[in-house]
Image (spheres, helix red, strand yellow):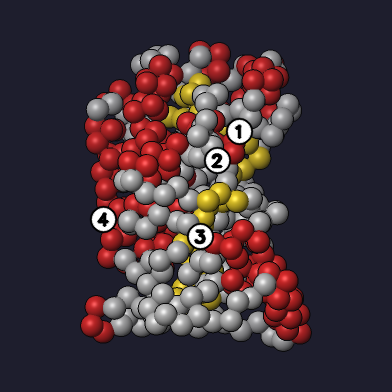
Amino acid sequence: MPSRFTGARRPALTLSAIVAMAALALGGCSSTPEEKPAAAAPAQTGGSAFPVTIDSALGQAKITEQPERVVTLGQGSAETSIALGLTPVGIESYAWGSDKTGYLPWIHEAVTKAGGTLPKQFAGGEDIDFDTIVELDPDVILAPWSGITKEQYAVLSGIAPTVAYPDLPWSTNWDQQIEIISKALGKPAEAQKLIADLRKRLADAAATRPQYKGVTFSYIYTTGPGTLGVFKPREQRVEMVSSLGLTVDPVVDSFKETEGTDSALIGLENAQKLAGSDVLFTFYTDEKTRKEIEGQKLYAAIPAVKRGGVVFSADTPFVTASSIINPLTVPWVIDRYLPLIDKAVATVKR
């Protein structure tokens, strides 16, 4: 990777060499006591945000200079980077939530509107396309809301400083993610403005819907017929709805959380415990699954379901955007969301 400030270039490493070094590093970690991560580097004088060290559950990212080439994994990091004025050179693809452009529509719209170059997309998840990431020559890899493993992190950090999640996979709060990314990109002061702007956008929308006040809801999901789960209050899609003025049904807190998921599997046999939810929010992976779920007697007997007080959409970009709070998804989804919620709230008897 070239030094973008001195013009020097470090010797190129092949992916096989990086993987070999990662294996050695992991082997060394398994034979020695785990060391406590060092504290983040202190703030620099003279207004410089670098060097900076960001701790994560998987290791430290030591970023010595202002990143120019960013690669993102997981969800939300690309959007925050774009909002901070730095379009990534590469992003993990998410075909299920993309539109006909092949991109998440809010990313496509933001980048093209700014006259920028769309990021290259590559496979992530369990089979990360490391070869493409090497070719992208990143200065930093951002993955604070992702599910990357210790083994994947070892390879990624051999390519560039890699910022992983601070605690557990897929458990980083949305505002915490913005703070982490802003720090990694040398713009820590801008984090609070982005966070405040998002909270104001949601509060302003809530102010236009006084009818939502006092309406209780649960955000449910299924993994197929015979199953039922609920998302907990701090899960991002739930927090988005509650920020619009609805109230999480208190019963949700009574269900034991599945560790690290911000959710609880409660079982279809407990469906009637949701009787106090005025409105339900959910999504379905496809039309066939929706019909199967709605055809179950225990599910159909939930009062909100019987009344038609269920908010859902078959549009996968919408489902994705309404599941993530970040500087691009909220502005894109909010005006699409409110009419759906209005319809469900209208079924509630006061």
Are circles 2 and 3 on residues that touch, CB within 8 Å?
no
- Report which residue position mark 4 lands on: 193
Secondary structure under the numbered disc 1 in the rendered image: strand
Which numbered disc flags the more N-terminal residue, 1 or 4?
4
Is 137 placed above or below 210 here?
Answer: below
Question: Mark 4 and 3 residues: CB-CB less than 8 Å, in contact?
Answer: no
10 Å crowding of disc 4: few (<14), some (14-19), many (20+): few
Task: Identify whether 79 is placed above or below 33.
Answer: above
Q: Residue furthest bottom?
A: 32
Compared across the picture, whether 206 is left or right of 133 comes to: left
How far apart marks 3 and 1 lie (CA) works out to 31 Å
Report the Cα–Cα distance between label 2 and label 3.
Answer: 29 Å
Q: Which residue is mark 2?
A: 231
Q: What's the amino acid at mark 4?
A: Lys
Q: Amino acid type of disc 2?
A: Phe
Q: Residues within 10 Å of mark 3 (few under 14, many from 20)?
A: many
Q: CA distance from mark 2 to mark 4?
A: 28 Å
Instruction: In this rendered view, identify the residue nearer to me: 274 or 294.
Output: 294
Q: Earlier in the sequence, mark 1 or mark 2?
A: 1
* Residue carrying label 3: 71
Residue 325 in view in this figure? no
User: In the rendered structure, which amino acid carries the disc numbered 1?
Assistant: Tyr
Residue 63, how many percent across, how many down?
A: 45, 76
Tag nearer the camera, 1 or 4: 4
Location of residue 96 (image quadrant): top right
* Residue at left offset 47%, top offset 31%: 318
**SS for callout 4:** helix
Mark number, residue 221 = 1
